Amino acid sequence: MPPPRRDLDAAPEGDGASDVAVRRAPFSDNPRVGARGQRTQQRIVDAALRLFGEEGYHRCGVARITELAGCSRASFYQYFSGKEDVFRHLAGQVARQLSASTEALGLVTPDAGGWRSIRAWVARYTAVYERYEAVFAVFQTAAESDAAVAGGGARTSERHVAGVVSRLTAATLPPRQLDPVVGLLLECLPRAFDTARTLRAAAPEAYPEDRMADAMADVVHRTLFGLQDANVHDPGPRPPALEFSPVMRNALETDAAGRDLTPTGRRTLDALMDAGRELFVARGYYDTRIDDVVAAAGLSHGAFYRYFDSKDRLVHLLTVQAIRTVSTALADTPRAAAPDGAARTAALRRWLRRYNATQAGEASMIRVWADAARHDPTLGADTAAAIDWGRRRMAHALRPRGFGDVDAEAVVFVALLSSFGARERPAPTIDAAAHVIERGLFGR
């Protein structure tokens, strides 16, 4: 009997918790196992979920999983062919639970009942995210090295989009425009949860879960149906401004990198930083080593240590540059939305194309810093401040609209731009982003 597929598209729909444990051939002529085997498999899955969150995708290995699960490697291989197989199993659980949540979505109408349907769906999505946060965090890394995960993820996304669209009773966009809009909103949700979680850790009173869920539901409902009484909620308290540490503030206010270097030294530093940026964005903080950076730059370890005393210092400098660069881009956002009518929308699309083409890597570098800080508090002192810095700029852009919870929806705005900028986007997705910003955030 061939081993069961465990990619995102393979398993039957369900809550994921009642998956039947099976042994992989050729370990048993009878692949079904009893309660003890089910407990062993569940310990393996739970251990892998924890380690993917703590150590990242590439650093997590079978040895560490079996050690934490308290089982032998032989027991592990009865159920999974490798850590990749465990991740497919986890991703399948996530896919089934999200599909079940979408199936439970009530009719999405322009009125308060439709908003309540979306709000309940956001709450269910939040619960799945909190249970499987590690899967969301490392999914892109896993997909880049596992075609089954990438393909299953794409198929699952298509199903979720179709499921949400099927619940709409009064679509205001044709399908060719509606599907990219819903798809982008679905991408934005987990990023918004993560962004809110980081801010909540620094200012818990300002970003309670219910407030953030209301803001997300408001933006989704407004994107689909326009500004309605049902999708406008009273603002909560103004969040405090989260300040950078003195070290980061000084770095942002000065530009000491590369000063007093010879042309050769400048080229060496640029090569190290370019290689580091590319690797950190592609692999993440924990899966990038100094060895990888110097190899990609074509330089020696000695060259690296002439400029940086550790990987952390390289990440710090790259993050400072990213914050400066994205700051310049975000400063243009209100002006891009300022003209009226068609000219306003065209200006916004131009800004989004420029942002996606030139700023996405820098925004991703800030995300690398935030992801690293999840596991290393010594790196995280400035993470919430960096996110709040962007949030305050988005709130400044939204405030003139004159309605709703601007400060909470600015978190969604930051998450939208972060999600949109994660990779190169085709024209339909650029149009979708413009629609979400214009209608869902500005209420036009």
Image (tube, helix red, strand yellow):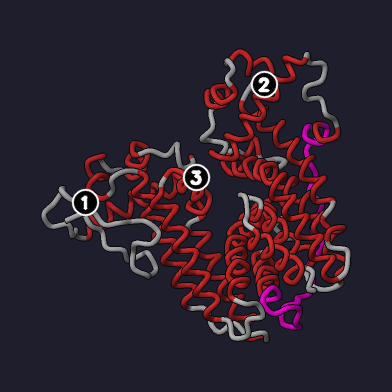
Discs 3/2, front: 3
Whole-percent x, y for residue 411 in the image: 72, 59
Q: Residue at x 87, y 58 (%)?
A: 335
Numbered disc 1: secondary structure: loop
Badge 2 is on which residue? 308
Give the farthest residue toward the left.
Answer: 29
Q: Is residue 228 magenta?
A: yes
* Residue 425 as seen in the image, left or right of residue 333: left
Where is residue 145? Give x, y as percent.
44, 43
Against 128, residue 136 (above or below) is above
SS at badge 3: helix
The three-letter code of the residue at mark 3 reads Thr
348 and 255: which is toward the camera = 348
Which corner quadrant holds the N terminus? bottom left
The answer to which of marks 3 and 2 sits earlier in the sequence is 3
- Are circles 1 and 2 on residues that touch, CB within 8 Å? no
Q: Please give the name of the residue rendered at 85% of the width and 30% of the height, measured from the top-left corner.
A: 254
Q: Name the residue that disc number 3 marks.
A: 141
Image coordinates of residue 284 in percent, x first then y, are 56, 39
Residue 207: tell me if it is visible: no
Give the Cα separation between the discs numbered 3 and 2. 26 Å
Up the image or down, 31 lies above or below 243; here it is below
Separation of disc 3 and disc 1 at Cα?
Answer: 26 Å
In the image, residue 395 lies at what x, y percent?
81, 60
Q: Which residues are magenta?
A: 221-250
Q: Which amino acid, mark 2?
A: Phe
Image quadrant containing the C terminus: bottom right
Residue 50 lies, with reference to residue 30, above or below; the image says: above
Res. 24 mark: 1
